[in-house]
Amino acid sequence: MQVEESAPGGAAGADRPHVTAAVLAGGVGARMGGGRPKQLLPLAGRTVLEHAVAALCAAPEVDDVVVLMVGDHLAEAERIVAGADLAKVSAVLPGGATRTATSAAALAAVAHRRDSDLLLLHDAARPLVSGAVISGCVAALATAGAVGVAVPSGDTVVEVAAGPGGTEMLRAVPPRASLRRMQTPQGFRLGVLRRAYERALADPALVATDDCGVVLRYLPGEEVRVVEGDEANIKITHPGDVEVAEVLLRLRAGTAGAAGAAGAAR
């Protein structure tokens, strides 16, 4: 599905870069079990995918949204987009077999954009991304070529090594103060991500799980800025995560309702 680009209220002009958000839904969610991709699971009356796309469409900084969906479920993603108020979606396209291939497909979808324009890459399995996180990511790209969203690690993270008989041994305990848990969106000036992927895709040993890591490895001189994420911006990965997300949505709705009532009482 390819639709004509709309001109949203925040449409980019000559004075600022165009911002495209790509929702990466190319995976099948093997850790969830079952035969259905996790991004198509129901969550509070909508699919996980629709929540993620709607959050990006609602962000005033975002000009258009591209959805990259696992090929076997492309038609269903098209139906979800067509049946919802997601006017900023400019295309629903097939994703790749890996995260790297899906990110490369997102880059191909914005091949007509300038190097100075911006691309946000967001996991479809993160349905609770907030407007504040999106805004912070875009704002940081005014002075950085690559931006990652992260939260401090509340747990001690250890490095292990293989031990005898298939066991694991503790190898190192990195200082927790310097550790973060990465989230999405990850944002880039297009010229930076294009250069990084040109080098990465020429590397037969390429193994990547996120796009900031691609920039860090293949453009070592490029700063990768880190901005504050949100603990509620969880990733639907394991059974039970949908129930946690539903609780967080109810809490968010309750907070918004209380704030609205307080404003009306003033």
Image (cartoon, rainbow, N blue to C red):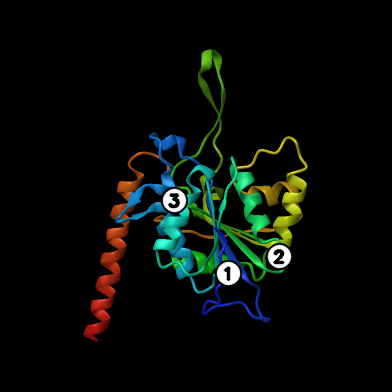
Who is closer to the viewer here, 237 or 53? 53
Mark 2 burial class by Cα count in 10 Å: few <14, some 14-19, many 20+: few
Residue drawn at point x = 40 percent, y = 52 percent: 48
Based on the displayed image, in which of its 4 quarters is residue 13 positioned?
bottom right
Of badges 1 and 2, the one in the foreground is 1
Secondary structure at badge 1 equals loop
What's under tag 3, amino acid-wise? Glu
Q: Is 125 positioned to the left or the right of 24 in the image? A: left
**For the residues bearing labels 1 and 2, Cβ distance under 8 angstroms:** no
Q: Is 214 positioned to the left or the right of 122 in the image? A: right
Q: Percent position (x, y) of residue 188?
A: 65, 61
Q: Residue furthest bottom?
A: 266
Q: Is 181 positioned to the left or the right of 223 in the image? A: left
What's under tag 1, amino acid-wise? Glu
Residue labelled with disc 1: 4
Q: CA distance from mark 2 to mark 3?
A: 27 Å
Who is closer to the viewer here, 83 or 148? 83
Mark 1 burial class by Cα count in 10 Å: few <14, some 14-19, many 20+: few
Mark 3 burial class by Cα count in 10 Å: few <14, some 14-19, many 20+: few
Q: CA distance from mark 1 to mark 2?
A: 14 Å
Residue drawn at point x = 63 percent, y = 45 percent: 100
In the picture, the disc for residue 76 is 3
Position of 31 relative to 220 (above/below): above
Secondary structure at badge 2 equals loop
For the C terminus, give its image quadrant: bottom left
Q: How many marks?
A: 3
Residue labelled with disc 2: 112
Q: Percent position (x, y) of residue 11?
A: 57, 77
What's under tag 2, amino acid-wise? His
Observer able to see residue 158: yes
Secondary structure at badge 3 equals helix
Q: Percent position (x, y) of residue 79?
A: 43, 56
